[in-house]
Amino acid sequence: MHNQDQVLLAALLRTAVDAIIVINDRGIMQSVNPATTKLFGYSEDEMVGENVKLLMPTPYREEHDGYLRSYHETGRAKIIGIGREVTGKRKDETTFPMHLAVSEVPLGDKKLFAGIVRDISDLKNAQQQLSEINDQLEQRVRERTSELHATQAELLKAGKLATLGQVAGGIAHEIRNPLNAVRTSAYYLRNAKKLTPEKTSEHLERIDRQVLLIEKVIKALSDFVRLPEPRLSKCNVSELINDIISEVSIADNVRMQNDVASDLPTAMVDPNQISIVFHNLIRNASDAMPQGGTITLASNVIESQIIIEVIDTGVGIGDEHIRRITEPLYSTKAQGMGLGLAVSAAILDKNHGHMEVESQLGVGTTFAVHLPRHFRS
């Protein structure tokens, strides 16, 4: 090596930020740079000539002996070219985490090894702090998730109670009148002074009618709860509407106008269930026009949906009612149980469709039924 190269090498070792230690194949330190003495707390004289185990705590001392023994037996240096994390020991016996990278330095017939050491205490502290922060965040997430689940449970409970209140109120409304009629007739039969056979028969028939009416309410609710899953198939919507118009019963003073396109795409729905929806809507439209009027059926196709509109020229629905008309047992009619629209909304939901409504008092109402299209695969 030229003198100039030696000077350059010495300058590099002297100014290197990382500790650089050169040992022979017996583990004896041959040279150390100033960064090494600063890192380990020994002077250069205290290190050079000593075994590098001086800088290692147990069990790294024993591992080092194993590496050297394996090297002498096999000629292979197992840790050459492999950076690894180990623990160093300072002169004051304190230890610290360090990164060690070893390279082999051929020098004539000798073999030397250079180890580059970097103190990674700051890195390990940062990793530890990051780990603690992550643990804290995970704990907070678990706590917030638990709080959220508790809140959701409370909201669900409140929602169920609210729904129960609505249904209970509806049931009470529907059966209160027939129960009052039964009570009145029973009171009369029990207390009448002169009870003729005709009056007895009249009141018994009234009781029977009112009991049947109550059974009808209960059956309708039961059917609503047990609404079956739809049997989806390709449905020709135009033909379905024509069939419904030919079947549905409307008032004599109501006119039906069919503007549904004859070439609509097929829908993927249960035809029998969708038929129930349109029967309900058409009957409701007829009931909304006691003075007569026109029911218009119209159609449109938007992207993946077929839209059928049922338009009446009736009395309309007020804003205070329109948001609740699909609730079970909610009705704006003097007669009826208020299940038709609730059933229709439930059917459409099961058939992956939905219903929208627009209304203006004194002008009329439009129900828009959205059905999913069937696309050929």
Image (tube, rainbow, N blue to C red):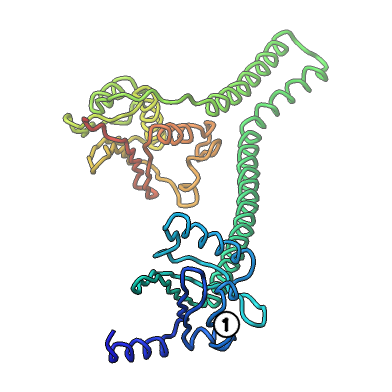
In this orientation, which residue lies closer to the viewer: 110 or 183?
110
State the residue lying farthest toward the front.
109
In this orientation, which residue lies closer to the viewer: 243 or 60?
60
In this rendering, the count of numbered labels is: 1
Which quadrant is the N terminus positioned in?
Answer: bottom left
| Mark 1, residue position | 40
When asked about the image quadrant of residue 174, the answer is top right
x 70%, y 14%: residue: 204
Which quadrant is the C terminus positioned in?
Answer: top left
In this orientation, which residue lies closer to the viewer: 370 or 117?
117
Question: Image check: 170 left or right of 196?
Answer: left
x 73%, y 12%: residue: 200
In this orientation, which residue lies closer to the viewer: 140 or 70?
70
Q: Residues within 10 Å of mark 1 (few under 14, many from 20)?
A: many
Question: Does 59 sit above or below residue 321?
Answer: below
Question: Does 40 sit above or below residue 103?
Answer: below
In the rendering, at what x and y percent does residue 342 appear? 48, 35
x 74%, y 25%: residue: 183
In the rendering, at what x and y percent does residue 30 appear? 47, 80
In the rendering, at what x and y percent does residue 241 appear? 27, 27
**Amino acid type at mark 1:** Phe
In the rendering, at what x and y percent does residue 308 appear? 28, 36
Helix, strand or loop at label 1? It is: helix
Question: Does 311 sit above or below residue 34?
Answer: above
